[in-house]
């Protein structure tokens, strides 16, 4: 497909479990972003990858959150020991044009029971 | 201070009419980009239009235009000839270029409802 893809589309987990969310960016895009969208906090930046550079982790809310990007393409966002406040939609975006327009995937809706 | 402010939580517009969604921004960076995204009930963020801080002309993309008033730090989205499919959340966002921030800062959004 031509767009950003994310999986799973929905994830329900129990408090304390670890979850992995996957993002497949648009082919050729060197920049990849993770955001979180929740009712109380709106859209929050989490982490940014650019090529082979060290990621910008300034938006990660706690050390339970981590992300990696393998081979400059697919990215995985991992949340360890999930808490109820982690319930949100996790959006991935990629960009590759000079204006840095970010193109978003459909998101993963995470529900922590 | 909020970097992006959208003061209209909800807006209604009659089908085929034009509507303006407000956005003001706050930055000291002389180089920045402004974006508008549409988020239908399906949840996906759809890019609509971009305006660079040094662009001389207001951006237009089909029925979307951006009323960019740099001195007032406003970047309002104008949708002409509204359609039922325009009903969605609309987010204004900004990326600063020189400060080193790599992410978009988003407003809280405006929910637009198009009335038939």
Image (cartoon, coloured by chain):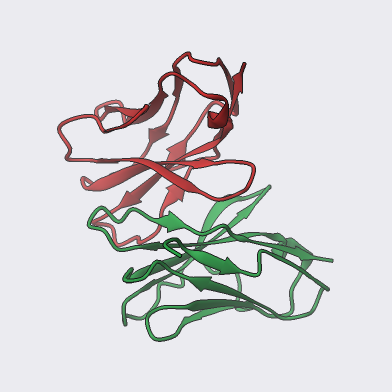
Chain colours: A green, B red
Examine the rendering and report whether any part of residue A78 can be seen.
Answer: yes
Q: How many labels does the image show?
A: 0
Q: Which residue is drawn at 31% across and 52% down?
A: B96
Q: For this rendering, which residue is in front, A67 or A30?
A: A30
Q: Which residue lies furthest to the bottom in this view?
A: A71
| Residue in view at x 33 percent, y 68 percent | A29
Residue A36 % position (x, y): 58, 59
The residue shown at (82%, 73%) is A15
Q: Quadrant of residue B84?
A: top right
Q: In this view, does B41 lie to the left or right of B19?
A: right
**Does residue A46 sit above or below B35 in this rendering?**
below
Image: B41 above or below B99 = above
* Residue ID at (49%, 32%): B6
Q: Where is residue A84 in the image (x, y as percent from the top left)?
A: 78, 64
Q: In this rendering, does residue B1 appear at all?
A: no
Q: Which residue lies furthest to the front in this view?
A: A1
Between B3 and B19, which is closer to the camera in this rendering?
B19
Residue B12 position in % (x across, y down): 59, 19
> Residue B16: x percent and y percent?
49, 15
Left or right of B38? Residue A11 is right
Q: Which of A69 and B8 is in front in this view?
A: A69
Q: Quadrant of the C terminus of chain A?
A: bottom right
Above or below residue A110? Residue B87 is above
């Amino acid at each position: 497909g031509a767009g950003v893809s994310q999986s799973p589309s929905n994830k329900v987990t129990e408090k304390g479990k670890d979850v992995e969310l996957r993002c497949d960016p648009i082919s050729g895009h060197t920049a990849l972003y993770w955001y979180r969208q929740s009712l109380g906090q709106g859209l929050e930046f989490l982490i940014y990858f650019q090529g082979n550079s060290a990621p910008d982790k300034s938006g990660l809310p706690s050390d339970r959150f981590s992300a990696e990007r393998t081979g400059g393409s697919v990215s995985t966002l991992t949340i360890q020991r999930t808490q109820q406040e982690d319930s949100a939609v996790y959006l991935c975006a990629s960009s590759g044009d000079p204006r840095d327009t970010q193109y978003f995937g459909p998101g993963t809706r995470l529900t922590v029971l | 201070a909020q970097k992006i402010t959208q003061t209209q939580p909800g807006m209604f517009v009659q089908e085929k009419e034009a509507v303006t969604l407000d956005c003001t921004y706050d930055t000291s960076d002389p180089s920045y980009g402004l974006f508008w995204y549409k988020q239908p009930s399906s949840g996906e963020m759809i890019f609509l239009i971009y305006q660079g801080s040094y662009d001389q002309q207001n951006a237009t993309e089909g029925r979307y235009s951006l009323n960019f008033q740099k001195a007032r730090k406003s970047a309002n989205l104008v949708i002409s000839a509204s359609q039922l499919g325009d009903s969605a959340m609309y987010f204004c966002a900004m990326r600063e270029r020189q400060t080193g921030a790599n992410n978009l800062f988003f407003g809280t959004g405006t929910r637009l409802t198009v009335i038939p």
